[in-house]
Image (tube, rainbow, N blue to C red):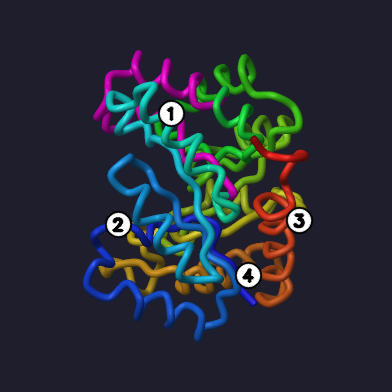
Amino acid sequence: MFFDPHCHLEMDAYEEDRDAVINKCIQEGLQYMLTVGTEEAHFDKVIDIIDRYPAVYGALGIHPHNSKDYTKAVADKIKLYAKHPKIVGYGEIGLDFFKNHSPRETQIKVFGAQLEVAKELRLPVIIHSRDAKEETLKILKDLYREGNDGVIHCYSYDLDYAKKFLDMGFYISIPGTITYKNTEKLAQVVKYIPDDRILAETDAPFLTPHPHRGKRNVPYFVKLTIEKMAEIRGKNKEELASVMGDNFVKLFLENTKGERP
């Protein structure tokens, strides 16, 4: 069995064939997928998908690109929707200083505010961080609460920072970019991550792994990422997939921290 802990099935890229894609993923052996709603406009679609497909769970949050759209009304909506039993994560949230679609100061403020909401909801956080490793680490050190687990999604930094995030208790999730050329830095991270903290994801429809690069990504392509990671770690693909499946269940499906609000 395989798992995709981070995809975006609610996005317009799947509008024409969403049901067919999800059914194909199930046929390909995916036991669970986590579809991550990153802006208010996608929240209802996330709920619709997780209601219709037992294999799909959901997360909600405001992506750093959309930080300028975060308001108390949006926060209240997330709190309301988070009561759904299949909303199992908060995110993705964080900082993106590469594209800066929202002002940096706004991203920092909203990141901190959402960490507090995630704590209130007792949901594991899904962290997006691009070109902002120092700032992300500082905010998490200041505001992250022990026992409120989370994952550094789509990891792109070096081994030194991976160790720092791991020391804080985070999981590290590796995207399909590990199948590209010239990924020695990321390969070092893949080799180092302990078995009980490692995940592989697609971030579909983005970051399609080799040999399908240039095409739309789909969740069952996670098998290609796991295959490459297993090669790097000197393990059997099915064995590594089983380890990652256990991590997915531990992080998202068993991580309740008591009765949720």
Near-viewer residue (250 or 198): 250
In which quadrant is the C terminus drawn?
top right
Q: Which residues are magenta?
A: 88-115
Which numbered tag is attached to residue 259?
A: none
Of the residues tagged 1 and 2, which is closer to the observer?
1
Of the residues tagged 2 and 4, which is closer to the observer?
2
Which numbered tag is attached to residue 11?
A: 2
Amino acid type, callout 2: Met
Which numbered tag is attached to residue 75?
A: 1
Near-viewer residue (211 or 116): 116
* Distance of label 2 from label 4 (alpha carbons): 32 Å
In which quadrant is the N terminus drawn?
bottom right
Looking at marks 1 and 2 on the same chain, the residue that comes earlier in the sequence is marked by 2
* Distance of label 2 from label 3 (alpha carbons): 31 Å
Residue 128: percent from left, percent from top: 46, 37
Looking at marks 1 and 3 on the same chain, the residue that comes earlier in the sequence is marked by 1
Of the residues tagged 2 and 3, which is closer to the observer?
2
Looking at marks 2 and 3 on the same chain, the residue that comes earlier in the sequence is marked by 2
Which residue matches tag 3?
195
Looking at marks 2 and 4 on the same chain, the residue that comes earlier in the sequence is marked by 2
Secondary structure under badge 2? Answer: loop
